[in-house]
Amino acid sequence: MQITIHWTAFDEYADQFRPGTRPGVTKTFNTEGIPVGWDDYYMLEALFVATNTYEGPLWDDMQPLPEDRSHTALSVGDVVELDGTPYRCATFGWNEA
């Protein structure tokens, strides 16, 4: 599966979070070995956990992260594409973007 993460949640404040960051930073990577029966929402939740705990196979697959991103953990407003289908992180769960 090809995954693209768009860190866009804090674009207007990016430089305040981490000086030298820029808005709309993305990272594309591939991952294999998705458990049988997982749909996109299981994968999105697994990515959310990985970026908040900084560990696990998905975390390892996405290394190295772009240095100029404003934040690491997925946040409300960030967008994740799974094989080209975009989803926006919502207050609770995910919405198709």
Image: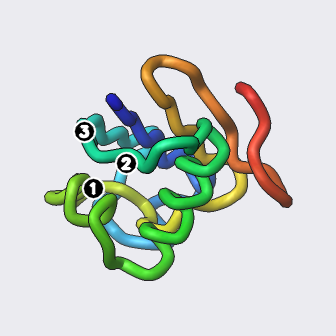
**Identity, as a three-letter code, of the amino acid under mark 3:** Phe
In the rendered structure, find residue 29 and report the number of the disc placed on it. 3
| Mark earlier in primary sequence (3, 2) | 2
Residue 12 position, x and y percent, is 60, 50
**Identity, as a three-letter code, of the amino acid under mark 2:** Arg
Position of 21 relative to 52 (above/below): above
Asked whether, in this view, residue 91 is left or right of residue 32, the answer is right
The answer to whether the residue labelled 2 contacts the one labelled 1, judged by CB atoms less than 8 Å apart, is yes
| Cα distance in 3D space between marks 2 and 1 | 6 Å
Which quarter of the rendered picture does the N terminus lie within? top left
Q: Quadrant of residue 20?
A: bottom left
Residue 23 position, x and y percent, is 45, 44
Callout 2 secondary element:
loop
**Identity, as a three-letter code, of the amino acid under mark 1:** Asp
Q: Of all residues shown, which one is farthest toward the top?
A: 84
The answer to whether the residue labelled 1 contacts the one labelled 3, judged by CB atoms less than 8 Å apart, is no
Callout 1 secondary element:
loop
According to the image, label 1 marks what residue? 68
- From the viewer's perspective, is the residue at label 3 or at label 2 nearer? 3
Which quarter of the rendered picture does the C terminus lie within? top right
- From the viewer's perspective, is the residue at label 1 or at label 3 nearer? 3
| Cα distance in 3D space between marks 1 and 3 | 17 Å
In the rendered structure, find residue 22 and report the number of the disc placed on it. 2
| Mark earlier in primary sequence (2, 1) | 2
Q: Of all residues shown, which one is farthest toward the front?
A: 36
